[in-house]
Amino acid sequence: MKAPVIVLQNVWKTYKMGEIEVNALRGVSLHINHGDFVAITGASGSGKSTMMNLVGCLDLPTKGSIFLDEKDISKMGESDLAQTRGQKIGFIFQQFHLIPTLSAVENVMLPLEFQDIPTDISKKKATEILQKVGLGDRIEHLPSQLSGGEQQRVAIARSLSNNPDVVLADEPTGNLDSIAGANVLNLLQSLWKKEGKTIIMVTHDLKLAGYARRIIQLKDGQIIKGG
C-alpha cells in the first residue's frame, strides 16, 4: 500500500504575542492518503489556516513532525521548502491573488517560469490547462475583464500548472456567488475523482465540506472529529 502523502505527528504551533504564548495547534496528528479529498472545518480561530500553512510548506511547526511524501518538511530550510512548494503543492486562495497586469495565460505560466521552464513550453501548457477549466476563449483576458468565477478558475488553473500532488484550497468559494461557487466545487471534485489529485479544502461552511470524502473538524487547535 502506498504511504500517506501527508502525515502530521504531534504537531504544535505556538505564536508569541508579547509575553503571551498562543497555541494555534496543540498536538495534532493526522494522515492524508494519496487521492483523498479532505475538508478541514472549524470556527474562526480553530487552527484551520495554521494547519494549511504548515501542510503547504509555508510555515514550520514549533514541535512535532510533518511528512510530505515521507520527507520531513519540518526539518527543511527555506530554499528546500520553496522548492517543495513549487513541485508538490498547488494553492487556491479565496482572494484569487492574480496579477492584474498579466493575462489569464500569463498568470498560469508564472509557477512554470519560476521552475525555469522555457516560455514557449510554459505558454502551451498554461493554455491547455485553461482549456481544461473551460476558459480556452479567455486566455488573453486580464483579471479585470473576467467574472469572479472565471478569475477563480484561472487561479485553479495556476495551481495545476506544475501538476502538483496536492491541491490546497483555502475558502475557494468565499468571494463567489452560489452558482460560480458550485462550479468551482464541481471542478475540484472532478480533479479528485477523474485525475486522482489529493484535495485539501479549508472551509468554515459544513455544506461545502460535504463535497469532500472526509471531514476533519478543529476546535481550539485540536482535532475533535475525523482524525
Image (cartoon, helix red, strand yellow):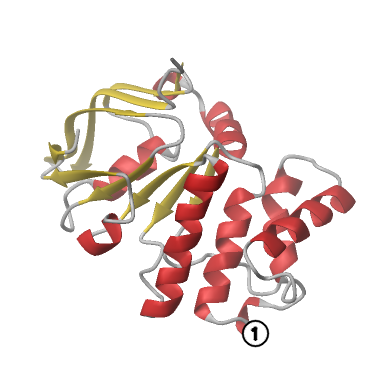
Image coordinates of residue 226 in percent, x first then y, are 18, 38
**Could you tell me which residue is drawn at 77 percent across and 52 percent down?**
125
Figure check: 125 above or below 139: above
Mark 1 is surrounded, within 10 Å at the Cα level, by few (under 14), some (14 to 19) or many (20 or more) other residues, namely some
Q: Position of residue 58 (x, y in %)?
A: 44, 40
**Residue 223 screen position, x and y as percent:** 15, 37
Q: Is residue 92 visible?
A: no
Q: Could you tell me how many numbered marks the image carries?
A: 1
Q: Is residue 204 visible?
A: yes
Q: Residue furthest right?
A: 120
Q: Is residue 204 left or right of residue 184?
A: left
Please indicate whether residue 178 sits to the left or right of residue 69 in the image.
Answer: left
Locate the C terminus by quadrant. top left
Residue at left 41%, top 71%? 181
Percent x, y of residue 26: 15, 32
Judging depth in this view, the residue of 219 and 62 nearest the camera is 219
SS label for mark 1 = helix
Q: In percent of the image, x 63 and y 77: which residue is there?
A: 143
Instruction: Examine the rendered structure and indicate whether residue 215 appears above or below residue 152.
Output: above
Q: Nearer the viewer, residue 23 or 132?
A: 132
Residue displayed at 56% across by 72% down: 151
Report which quarter residue 12 is drawn in.
Answer: top left
Question: Is residue 188 shown above or below 179?
Answer: above
Q: Of all residues shown, which one is farthest toward the front? A: 194
Residue wearing tag 1 = 145
In front here: 97 or 171?
171
Q: Quadrant of the N terminus?
A: top left
Q: Which image quadrant for residue 134?
A: bottom right
**Horizontal relation, residue 121 to residue 15: left or right:** right
Establish if 132 lies above or below 31: below
Q: Quadrant of residue 102?
A: bottom right
Amino acid type, label 1: Gln
